[in-house]
Image (tube, rainbow, N blue to C red):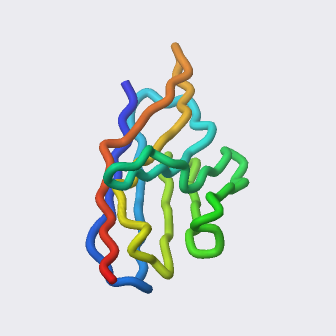
Amino acid sequence: QVQLVESGGGLVQAGGSLRLSCAASGSIFSINAMGWYRQAPGKQRELVAVITSGGSPRYADSVRGRFTISRDNAKNTGDLQMNSLKPEDTAVYYCNARVVTSLAYLEVWGQGTLVTVSS
């Protein structure tokens, strides 16, 4: 069984920064893409950023230039550095990973961490 645990959410003023972290644990052979999604109240979950196992990132237009995704393959962790935060960034942020185990290829989600940006 594989689990993802996020940390680092909280309340910040507009223009501030937060860093989210995601740690994967369990019977992991390797992790392909790792990503961050978010869901604001009343809206659908959307992709924020994703990074391949080789370190190639991709960002949503709304966060490009402000957010930076990274990962540590040796530690099975991933981070999302969020700068110049805006009130519209307020959402629950979810870590996502495409995990290879000895038995299966899994898509795993974390429990979510709330980010609130005040104006």
Q: Residue furthest front?
A: 42
> Can you say whether 106 is above or below 37 in the image?
above
Q: Nearer the viewer, residue 104 or 27?
A: 104
Q: Quadrant of residue 3?
A: top left
Q: Quadrant of residue 117?
A: bottom left
> Can you say whether 90 is above or below 95 in the image?
below
> Can you say whether 93 is above or below 10 in the image?
above
Quarter holding the C terminus? bottom left
Q: Nearer the viewer, residue 7 or 119?
A: 119
At 51% across and 24% down in the image, what residue appears? 106
In the displayed structure image, the side of residue 117 where residue 99 appears, left or right = right
x, y percent for residue 27: 43, 27
In the displayed structure image, the side of residue 18 where residue 82 appears, left or right = right
At 50% across and 69% down in the image, what residue appears? 81
At 49% across and 60% down in the image, what residue appears? 79
x, y percent for residue 59: 64, 59
Picture mark count: 0
At 64% across and 74% down in the image, what residue appears? 65
Quarter holding the N terminus? top left
x, y percent for residue 52: 67, 46
x, y percent for residue 49: 58, 55
